[in-house]
Image (cartoon, rainbow, N blue to C red):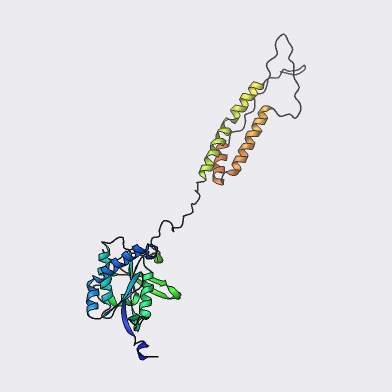
Amino acid sequence: MPDDATPKRLEIGHVLFIDIVGYSKLLSDAQAEALHELNHLVRETESFREADAAGKLVPLPTGDGMALVFRNSVEAPVECALELSQALRRKPSLPVRMGIHSGPVHQVEDVNERSNIAGAGINIAQRVMDCGDAGHILVSKRVADDLAQSRRWQPYLHDLGDAEVKHGVVISIVNLFADVIGNPNPPAKFGGARSARSKPREKKQPKSYSPLIYVIPIVAVIIPAIIFAPAIMHSVNKKKAAPPPLPSQPAISQPTAPGTPSLGDEITNMVTKNVEDQLKKIPDEIKAATTKASATPGASPSPRQSETPGPGQNP
């Protein structure tokens, strides 16, 4: 194996991974236009031009974006991301997400014998970016720990927690944003806002009603029935009473079948049975109040009819 083909020694690369959100859904000509616009905006950033002029930058095209490997400072990819985020605010039709990670990389030659970069530093940077949505600038916990040593970057760092990425790898993610930079909303992977289509539909719970709604109508029927039952029975008995016999005709007594209840008795039994059935459905405290209200004094004895003394009896 030629010596030139062997990878060189590992070094720490500060990687900014960028891609266009929804790139694969665009038409071919729209893809070419979006990628051309992104390349132009990236090359116009001051961080890109400085690192490229110093020979401390390796840009790698990725089809729907790019990976920028900075070799000068951990702040270089962050500065580039901030400049790009500000420029994209004037391009709302170009949704972009970014991920930053510092890790081991090594230089290799690709099939065209051009210098290329490979290694875990690039792979993790891509996984960090994949956790974001349009407008997000996400950084790994390692980069966040380095940036936190400076008072300048501390207000930009907002911890999101751990995320499981490809091949079951778990990485800690920090969202980097300010007033007009980045995306302050949590990514969908971390429980951020979902679209209306993917939002689960809430199951409606049946309405619950107070037991008084069922008790009040029952009481409203029972109380009047108890109060007016004696008056109803008295009126019915009065109407059913036989008229007095005419003077010219002897009174004809019609025999009543033994054991046959009168209409007044039937009404009394019906009302009593209805009241008892309704009382069984009422809670104990309502039942006690209803029973107390339904208590009526005992029937006063009817006046004794005057008796005509028979023969041999004293009046």
Q: Of residues 37 and 178, which is closer to you in this image?
A: 37
Q: Position of residue 117 (x, y in %)?
A: 34, 80
Q: Quadrant of residue 151?
A: bottom left
- Quadrant of the rendering where the C terminus is positioned: top right
Residue 295 in which image quadrant = top right
Q: Position of residue 167 (x, y in %)?
A: 45, 75
Task: Report the quarter where the N terminus lies.
Answer: bottom left
Residue 146's image quarter? bottom left
Q: Position of residue 261 (x, y in %)?
A: 71, 29
Q: Residue at x 40, y 58 (%)?
A: 195
Does 22 sit left or right of 309 as displayed? left
Q: Is residue 268 left or right of residue 159?
A: right
The image shows residue 150, relative to residue 300, as above or below, that is: below
Relative to 148, 236 lies left or right: right
Q: Is residue 16 visible?
A: no
Above or below residue 44? Residue 309 is above
Does residue 46 show up? yes
Identity of the residue drawn at 66% across and 28% down: 264
Foreground of the two, 281 or 44: 44
Q: Residue at x 35, y 89 (%)?
A: 4
Numbered-mark total: 0
Q: As displayed, is residue 309 above or below residue 152?
A: above
- Residue furthest right as drawn: 312
**Where is residue 141 shown, x and y percent of the image?**
34, 75
